[in-house]
Image: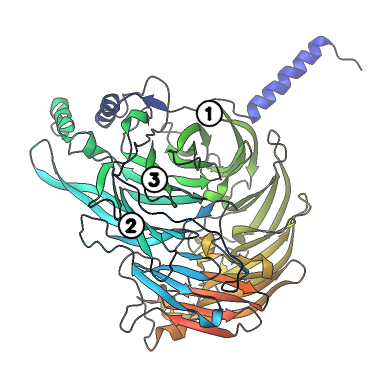
Amino acid sequence: MRSSPRSVVQLGLAIGSMLALSVNCQRPPQLHKFGDCEEFEAFLKDQVMHPTVQTAGGMPTFGFGCASAPMASDSSAPQSESSGTLADSSRATSYTTTNVQEVDVDEADFVKNDGEHIFVLRRGHLTILDAWPPEQTHVVADVLVDTDQDSRGFIGNPFSMFFDGTRLMVISTAGGRWTPVRNVSGAEFWGGFSGVVISLFDISDVGTPLLLRRVRIDGNYLDARRVGDQVALVTSSWLAWPFLSDSPFSDDANRRALDEFGLDNMLPGLEDQIMGVDSAPRRDRACACDNAYAPDQTDGRSLVLVHALSMSDPAAAIRSTTVVSGQSTVYGSDKAIYLAATEWKEEGYFTPTYPQTRIHKFSVFQGTGAAEYQATAVVEGAIHNQFSMDEQGEDFRIVVTNNQEGNSTSLIVLQQEADALVEVGRVDEIGKGEFVQAVRFLGDMAYIVTYPEPWGWNVLPPSPPGNYWDPLFVVDLSDPHRPRLRGELQVDGFSTYIHPLGDDHVLTIGVNTSHDNRVLGLSLSIFDVADPDLPALVHRIHFGDGWSFSDALNDHHAFTYFPEHKTLAIPLQLADWNTSGWWGGLQASGLEVFRVDVGAGFTHLGRIDQTSLYGAQSVTLETAGCIDVRRSVMMADEQGAYVYAVSTGGVSVARIEQGLPAVASVGLLQPGDPFCPLYDLPL
């Protein structure tokens, strides 16, 4: 039947209305740029005085950014070339590295490996082990990372690092930079910033690590990514303000206090010292206000900063970009950093609060320049973790859950148009009424796991009797403008991390629960996803009990899979609640090792138990949480494959075969050392 022109128009209007309902084309608020320090400082002062009145240039915005000027030194420090893995007799021919979200984007961790050496951060030390051949594993270097004992200097607690051939960049926490501040009444008090310390080492000679540079940045560590030579370090900070009186309130007196305090004291600072070049640290602002961006109606207090650093050039300028934002979750691709901050909105007495996530995109890893602001998006809902975000080509994909009218999860596809990330497609009502537990984007597919209850650590809240299932959803993203929900599979328990396993399968770790929501232990699962419409659970193994725990449930860096040898290593603590209660009933703390095969399923090869590394000392309620294996490394050559378990007690080496026969053991605790580190350190 032939359509009339009028019917065609009506059909077009109907389709347009449907698309308008399904795709949010509203441009999100963007950033506003300031021209100089005077304008920037005036805005910040207005914001702290009247946060709901002042605006940044008259247009809705979110976040401010500033790129710092380079900190020049009077000469260059010696450099050495970075080298990749060498396939020679002194090292393994294949080995695992840090488990990361994106293949070409490294993530910081406290254990690194190059197929010959294992680098471990423990109790303020950088410990380097020669780990190949495995039976001769031994310590070749052990140095204090921060040796400056001046509390006003660079002293810190190292907890994470990057490794790139002959360079190690160690990240530490540090104490506050305390300065006297006077309030409007004339009283003096102390205030300041905590700090993040970066220590760059040359390890061309692994037996003698050479400190090249040390940088201290006011603020707290959030996350970091590395692509090649370039590192993007993300920190958070607060703008410092003097005490402002509100009883009685005096606008004039408070503004005088702000004027006397000055911009230099407000902004976080940065100290930089190139060894052998600078006799003392050079101090500057962490950002320069002549390239600053500000939000509309913000209190101007919380900041997130992205710092661009070089691993190969210890004299390279450090440039920082800052965003006014709450605590942000970081996702990094090989060309961009995305900062996602979730806020809780309230629209009135009769409207429940709901989450809204603001995402800022910055280009990074493009030489030694500062991260450059690209675009902003605002989406309704909250993200689960970094795996809720992904970039593929021109598409940015994000999974969010909204609590309005019951929990409802959506997958949204955004594309950049000028300085906005604009929604081009979405799928709604994924796992209606449930909470996201795991997300993984793999190519044109997304895999999402939900569960009726939230989960934190290893305890679920009491729940009424009912059927508690783990739905695995498959979303097809091959057409970003028309993403569609394909298959759905319901199984017992739920997964907390999803790992690729070839082209047609995924491997997961999760929690084994009963239908009435009781935790029964941990589980590993293999799902066949070759047919997106019919995902299938093909293999599963349960291990541990209801009070067992593994770092791999919450931290993917503790999940070590060796694809060349189809081997998986998982840290595990086992407890016997029925006899002695939780920590008092600790049965074992070790590394569980499994053979993983999509055809045959899981084969438990055994457990590496490190009890012997702790000598005659007995485990107590206070120390039981400190002896667990935290990381693992695997290496292999044509003669065989080996697994290394790393804990505060030391490193244990076993051959990867049934029973895990022991090969070597290196204790790192000295007689009289406490099980637990004195500070908040990983080992």
Could you tell me the amino acid type at mark 2? Thr
Q: Residue furthest bottom?
A: 616
Horizontal side of 322 relative to 84 (left or right) equals left
Q: What x and y, as percent, mark residue 396? A: 59, 39
- Camera-side mark, 2 or 1: 2
Residue to which mark 2 is pinned: 173
Residue to which mark 3 is pinned: 316
> In this rendering, is residue 421 above or below 161?
above
Q: Residue furthest left?
A: 186
Residue 379 or residue 407, whichever sits in front: 379
Q: What x and y, as percent, mark residue 83? A: 53, 58
Could you tell me the amino acid type at mark 1? Ala
* Mark toward the start of the polypeptide (3 vs 1): 3
The residue that appears at 68% across and 67% down in the rendered structure is 564
Residue to which mark 1 is pinned: 420
> In this rendering, is residue 166 above or below 72?
below
**Alpha carbon distance from label 3 to label 2:** 22 Å
